[in-house]
Image (spheres, rainbow, N blue to C red):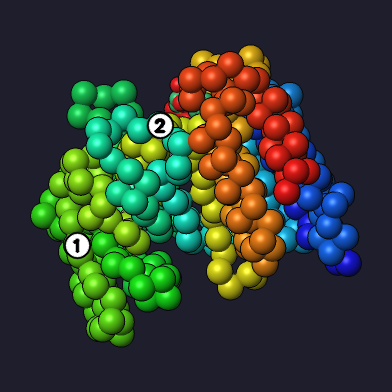
Amino acid sequence: VNPFKIAVIPGDGIGPEVIAEGVKVLKYIQSVDESVSFEFEYFPWGCEYYVEHGKMMDDDGIERLKQFDAIYLGAVGYPGVPDHISLWDLLLRIRKSFDQYVNVRPIKLLNGAPTVLKDVTPEDINMLVIRENSEGEYAGAGDRLFQGKPHEVALQTGVFSRKGTERIIRYAFDIAQKEKRSLTSISKANALNYSMVFWDEVFEEVSKDYPDVETHSYLVDAASMFFVMDPKRFEVVVTSNLFGDIITDLGAGITGGMGLAAGANLNPERDFPSMFEPIHGSAPDIAGKQIANPLATLWSASQMLEFFGQNEWAEKVLSLIEKMLVDKTVLTPDLGGTASTSEVGDHMVQLLKQL
Ligand code: NAD
Ligand code: IPM
Ligand code: MN
């Protein structure tokens, strides 16, 4: 069979620790299913690479990644290298170069997962956040004027193109329509008088093509409050790059924490590889201790399997994550357990064997 070609970028901090478990599980799957084959190639890019070579990735890095079906990434960023360099030269560069304009982040309370909220059940938190991932507040446009002077000014310009705004909103409507769920737009037109007024207009326009989809629109501040106080209001959610970044960490906070939050960076046209990664960072505070939770990275692997059309395996992995949360026997300390990162991966393989 034709192998799915996966570029593995473990990256920094806990990145390599959690990615090792994801690759372990994928390798197990290919060992028992002769209709599935993966080809892994590792790229040592990240902050250590930067310290050694003065760059986060090779000059021809983007060109080399083009031939892959998917990128599986751990985390990028580490004390010692300024975050705006490490992230812009690796993670954000990949998202932009490959026009991965859709960031799909499930905010879903799995069975057995702990939540800080009172009296909520998995039925109450089941959202799919569709984050714009190519422009907006992350356009990288701006300037530093009069540096060091008392009248110094820093400018950061959001860029919301019609093409960029319309395609992400349309993508979210398509999902909501297909899944027969409501769609909520999260914006902030009361203060952001150009970009978010435009966003709301486009949302309104596009909604006319989807008369069967129930829509809602929230300001991001109020939405943040309702994420915590009444999360069941939200089903499919579409929002801008920065708001999506922030509300998905908030979402992680109500569904078991960063160790359980997964994301897919998609180029839906498949002109370029898509990228799968946990939404957490390199967690320098726990790196190197083998206590990082790899379940978010396994969930991202499940998203990658779905992207490859391997829906059965995708569902198996996700349902076994849920089983591990319910059983509570092999979990990392962030979820109240005592298992190591690799014990969690090993256990997932054991459970797959028993299926
Ligand atoms: P972080 O997500 O790395 O960590 C936040 C908190 O969550 C920490 O207390 C950490 O220990 C905990 N945590 C994160 N992942 C965990 C896991 N798998 N298991 C258990 N606990 C986990 O965010 P931060 O500390 O703000 O950022 C650290 C670095 O990572 C920075 O350089 C930042 O720019 C970068 N970052 C990278 C990405 C990415 O590569 N996609 C995402 C976010 C942050
Ligand atoms: C994420 C991260 C990145 C983002 C950072 C590291 C640039 O926080 O993937 O959520 O803001 O998109
Ligand atoms: Mn983030």
Report the side of 95 relative to 155 (left or right): right
Residue 178 to residue 32: above or below: below
Report the side of 168 relative to 197 (left or right): right
State whether residue 77 appears in this view. no
Q: Earlier in the sequence, mark 1 or mark 2?
A: 2
Whole-percent x, y for residue 70 in the image = 69, 56
Q: Residues within 10 Å of mark 2 (few under 14, many from 20)?
A: some
Tag 1 residue: 217
Closer to us: 325 or 354: 354
Distance between the Cα atoms at labels 1 and 2? Answer: 29 Å
Q: Quadrant of residue 132?
A: bottom left
Residue 189 to residue 256: above or below: below
Mark 2 element type:
loop
Q: Amino acid at mark 1?
A: Ser
Tag 2 residue: 114
Whole-percent x, y for residue 127 in the image = 36, 54
For the residues carrying marks 1 and 2, which lies nearer the camera in this image?
Answer: 2
Closer to us: 1 or 76: 1
State whether residue 127 appears in this view. yes
Seen at 31% across and 23% down, the residue is 148
Residue 110 to residue 37: above or below: above
